[in-house]
Image (cartoon, helix red, strand yellow):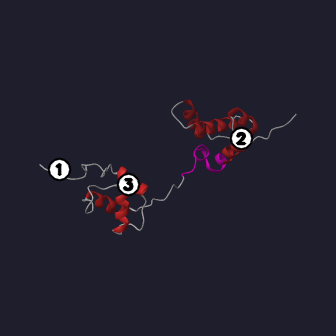
């Protein structure tokens, strides 16, 4: 008969109560619930391989959850670390200058701004060293600007 090595996770009373509360209700990500269930089963003395089979996780994943709990506590065991994300292509000053440009009249000979024209003019006017159409499109969209329409919503009202 094969013997299973136990990880020996003992939840602190406060962590046990927090885990009970999380598992008994509320909306959580499936990943978090599975990790909580794994900790719960490890706390009750089940073997890593048994927990892995019960929750359809790999034994390595279950061991890592247990180790993260032992090393860093409940939050680190349940939740992923914050990821850095992509760095912004434009700084605040560059964004403001492009928005100000779009709020002004389009260049001579043009009826309205287009995303391509905004990108070209921003580089031509040395507002930014380089900028792509998609970056400009996302910037304009985030400010709810649609300069390619006949009536530019940015212009002041006449009374």
Q: CA distance from mark 1 to mark 2?
A: 63 Å
Residue picked out by circle 1: 157
Instruction: In the rendered structure, find residue 58 and report the number of the disc placed on it.
Output: 2
Name the residue rendered at 27%, 58% in the picture. 110
Depth check: give the residue in front, 158 or 91: 158
Q: CA distance from mark 3 to mark 1?
A: 24 Å
How dense is the environment of label 3, judged by Cα within 10 Å: few (below 14), some, or many (20 and up)? some
Depth check: give the residue in front, 10 or 1: 1
Residue 53: name its quadrant: top right
Residue 138 at x, y = what percent?
40, 52
| Residue at disc 2, secondary structure | loop
Residue 117: name its quadrant: bottom left
| Residue at disc 3, secondary structure | helix
In the rendered structure, the answer to whether residue 150 lies left or right of residue 135 reads: left
Which residue ends up furthest to the left in the rendered image? 159
Residue 136 at x, y = what percent?
39, 56
Extent of the magenta region: 68-82
Instruction: Give the mark nearest the N terminus, 3 or 2.
Output: 2
Q: Is residue 81 magenta?
A: yes
Say whether residue 45 is visible. no
Residue picked out by circle 3: 139
Q: Are marks 1 and 2 in contact (CB under 8 Å)?
A: no
Majority secondary structure in the magenta region: helix
Depth check: give the residue in front, 14 or 73: 73
In the rendered structure, the answer to whether residue 3 lies left or right of residue 27 reads: right
Q: Are marks 3 and 1 in contact (CB under 8 Å)?
A: no
How dense is the environment of label 2, judged by Cα within 10 Å: few (below 14), some, or many (20 and up)? some
């Amino acid at each position: 008969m094969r013997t299973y090595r136990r990880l020996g996770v003992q939840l602190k009373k406060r962590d046990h109560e927090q885990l009970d509360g999380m598992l008994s209700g509320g909306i959580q990500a499936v990943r978090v619930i599975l990790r909580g269930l794994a900790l719960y089963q490890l706390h009750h003395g089940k073997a890593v391989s048994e927990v892995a089979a019960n929750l359809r996780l790999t034994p390595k994943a279950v061991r890592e959850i247990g180790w993260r709990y032992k090393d860093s506590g409940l939050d680190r065991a349940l939740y992923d670390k914050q990821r850095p994300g992509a760095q912004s292509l434009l700084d605040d000053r560059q964004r403001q200058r492009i928005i100000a440009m779009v709020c002004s009249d389009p260049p001579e000979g043009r009826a309205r701004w287009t995303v391509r024209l905004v990108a070209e003019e921003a580089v031509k006017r040395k507002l930014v060293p380089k900028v792509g159409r998609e970056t400009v499109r996302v910037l304009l969209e985030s400010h709810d600007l649609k300069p390619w329409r006949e009536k530019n919503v940015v212009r002041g009202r006449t009374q």
